[in-house]
């Protein structure tokens, strides 16, 4: 209880840090201000952060000096390319960029953990704090790993949480096995021949091709996926044209396809390429499809899920911990860290608009809850 009271006392500071990050959101790999502030705070707490890992990543180690497991905790730092319509006093000061997924809160909570553990270190082992860039484009965890994260800061277990508006405040979801979809981020370019809107017969219209392709892609899951499997494809961007009387020369579409099994991801991507080839043949446009990122499903290890659930129960009570929820359809490149070491990904309920909605804002009430769960997990493992 003493620990949780100490964490609760950090809530005003964590709230201030969170709102500052919210005012100054930065896109994937552009988190220079955020990571600079993170590193500065860590130094203030007496730690020795290492900066620039995988671009803008920051890592700090709290070592007890005694033998024991090495436990890694990870927060993501990036924001989204969209407007902030939260209407809060701490709304984004950068047009077109918003912390609409709550990574401002994840970062502030992990800073709270750092602050507490720096002055109350674990009795054994060590804690590795990972502040990761670029979760939203699926490239940040890979960049940190390629920059030597796993060799330079070896860890035996790894944990992360995501705020979850689909759960109520006071609820935590932790399941064993697959817990989040893997995804492939795809990007399609449709090239045609532009021209006058009235002379469509002299043009090769990429807008019409893109529109057909969008509906064709949206029918893939319903026509080609075994209904016993789960998977989804979403077209989230379709860009074409500039005026009412100009047929554009090109159009673009982008989106994601997601599934819990690698073989389903492969099947969906194959059907996506087939749809591109089919619409190209039909319309005469040149259509090329690229995969921009690929992230595997997020799979919780049984012991990791048990440990995370025990920490959640210590903070929220047994009745707040949901162990048998269905996997969520989202994706997090934390999956790559879970491939490197066993652990778990937790969902912590909060009252807010859905993530990626323009009205979304991270709930500050979740900061001491999340930090309390992380610190409890560390105490339970390392003393
Ligand atoms: Zn997000
Ligand atoms: Zn997120």
Image (cartoon, grey):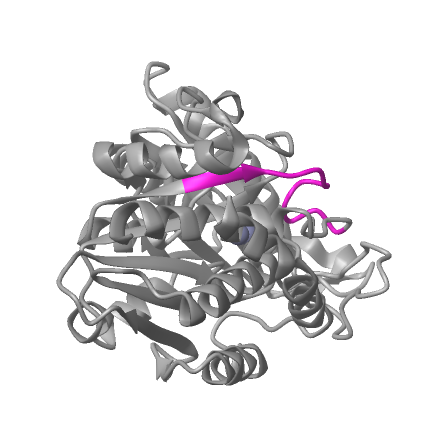
Q: Is residue 66 magenta-colored?
A: no
258 or 30: nearer the viewer: 30
Q: Residue at x 41, y 28 (%)?
A: 327
Q: Please provide percent x and percent y for residue 352.
A: 72, 41
Quadrant of residue 195 within the rendered picture: bottom right
Outermost residue toward the front in this view: 2
Q: Is residue 357 magenta-colored?
A: yes
Q: Residue at x 42, y 71 (%)?
A: 118
Q: Is residue 286 left or right of residue 87?
A: left
78 or 199: nearer the viewer: 78
Q: Is residue 267 left or right of residue 175?
A: left
Q: Please provide percent x and percent y for residue 297.
A: 31, 41
Q: Please provide percent x and percent y for residue 281.
A: 41, 45
Work out whether residue 255 can be spotted: no
Magenta span: chief secondary structure: loop
Which span of residues is magenta-colored?
346-358
In the depicted structure, whether residue 209 falls above or below residue 46: above
In the depicted structure, whether residue 282 falls above or below residue 295: above
226 or 340: nearer the viewer: 340
């Amino acid at each position: 209880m003493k620990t949780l009271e100490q964490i609760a006392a950090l809530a005003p500071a964590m709230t201030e840090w969170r709102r500052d990050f919210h005012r100054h959101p930065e896109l994937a790999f552009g988190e220079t201000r955020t990571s600079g502030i993170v590193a500065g705070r860590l130094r203030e707490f007496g730690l020795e952060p290492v900066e620039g890992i995988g671009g803008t990543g920051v890592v700090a180690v709290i070592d007890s000096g005694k033998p024991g497991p090495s436990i890694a905790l990870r927060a993501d730092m990036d924001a989204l390319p969209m407007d902030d319509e939260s209407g809060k006093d701490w709304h984004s000061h950068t047009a077109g960029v918003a912390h609409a997924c709550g990574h401002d809160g994840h970062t502030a909570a992990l800073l709270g953990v750092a602050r507490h553990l720096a002055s109350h270190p674990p009795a054994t082992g060590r804690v590795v704090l990972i502040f990761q860039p670029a979760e939203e484009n699926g490239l940040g965890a890979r960049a940190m790993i390629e920059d030597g994260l796993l060799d330079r800061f070896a860890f035996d277990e790894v944990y992360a949480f995501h705020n979850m508006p689909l759960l109520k405040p006071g609820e935590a979801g932790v399941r064993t096995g697959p817990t989040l979809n893997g995804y492939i981020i795809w990007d399609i370019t449709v090239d045609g021949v532009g021209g006058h809107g009235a002379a469509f017969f002299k043009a090769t219209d990429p807008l019409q091709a893109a529109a057909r392709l969008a509906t064709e892609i949206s029918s893939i899951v319903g026509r080609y996926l075994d209904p016993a499997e789960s998977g989804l494809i979403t077209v989230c961007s379709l860009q074409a044209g500039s005026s009412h009387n100009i047929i554009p020369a090109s159009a673009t579409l982008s989106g994601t396809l997601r599934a819990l099994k690698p073989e389903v991801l492969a099947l969906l991507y194959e059907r996506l390429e087939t749809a591109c080839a089919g619409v190209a043949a039909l319309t005469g446009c040149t259509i090329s499809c690229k995969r921009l990122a690929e992230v595997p499903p997020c799979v919780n290890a049984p012991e990791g899920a048990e440990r995370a659930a025990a920490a959640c129960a210590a903070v929220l009570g047994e009745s707040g911990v949901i162990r048998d929820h269905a996997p969520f359809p989202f994706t997090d490149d934390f999956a790559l860290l879970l491939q490197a070491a066993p652990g778990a990904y937790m969902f912590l309920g909060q009252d807010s608009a859905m993530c990626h909605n323009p009205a979304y804002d991270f709930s500050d009430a979740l900061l001491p809850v999340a930090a309390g769960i992380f610190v409890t997990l560390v105490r339970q493992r390392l003393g």
